[in-house]
Amino acid sequence: MYGSIAAGVAGFLVAVELDYPFVGLVVYWTGILAFLGVWKGTSVTLYDERDLELERRASLRTLQIAGGVGLVAMTGLVVADQLPSVAVPEQAVGGFYTISALFVVYGAVYTAVRYRR
């Protein structure tokens, strides 16, 4: 199931490198649709409580790493931006907004799930 996504992403990257972006998108979406076909089209149980626990732990670790790296990087960029010889690119500001939005969405979803129980 996950191999179909990996093949779609790899096919997309190869096709873009060969200057066939439309073909790359077709290969990418074929991989995504194959993933969905296996996920929804089979009656086999694909997940159990062990998988859910792994996903929970992996999600927590991902948020911890993204938060830690984001905090250090963005603090460093604010300090660097005050130096006369450094200009922080707009992409860095966009990255700051993106990681901030990730944590806002997480907080909202966490709150909603907590109070639905």
Image (cartoon, grey):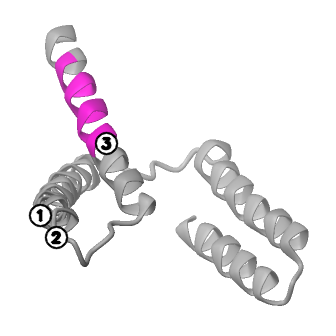
Lower sequence index among marks 3 and 1: 1
Whether tag 2 and tag 1 are in contact, CB under 8 A, the answer is yes
Q: CA distance from mark 3 to mark 2?
A: 29 Å
Mark 3 or mark 2, whichever is nearer to me? 2
* Residue 14 located left or right of residue 105: right
Secondary structure mostly seen in magenta is: helix
Mark 2 or mark 1, whichever is nearer to me? 2
Question: Residue 78 or 59: which is nearer the viewer?
Answer: 78
Question: Residue 37 or 65: which is nearer the viewer?
Answer: 65
Element marked by disc 2: loop
Element marked by disc 3: helix
**Location of the N terminus (image quadrant):** bottom right
Question: Residue 62 or 46: which is nearer the viewer?
Answer: 62
Q: Picture quarter containing residue 23?
A: bottom right
Tag 3: Cα neighbours inside 10 Å, few (<14), some, or many (≥20)? some
Q: For mark 2, what is the residue?
A: 83
Element marked by disc 1: helix
Tag 1: Cα neighbours inside 10 Å, few (<14), some, or many (≥20)? few
Q: For mark 1, what is the residue?
A: 79
Whether tag 3 and tag 2 are in contact, CB under 8 A, the answer is no
Q: For mark 3, what is the residue?
A: 102
- Range drawn in magenta: 100-111
> Could you tell me the amino acid type at mark 1?
Val
Residue 76: x %, y % from top left: 13, 67
Whether tag 3 and tag 1 are in contact, CB under 8 A, the answer is no
Q: Is residue 83 magenta?
A: no
Residue 98: x %, y % from top left: 37, 47
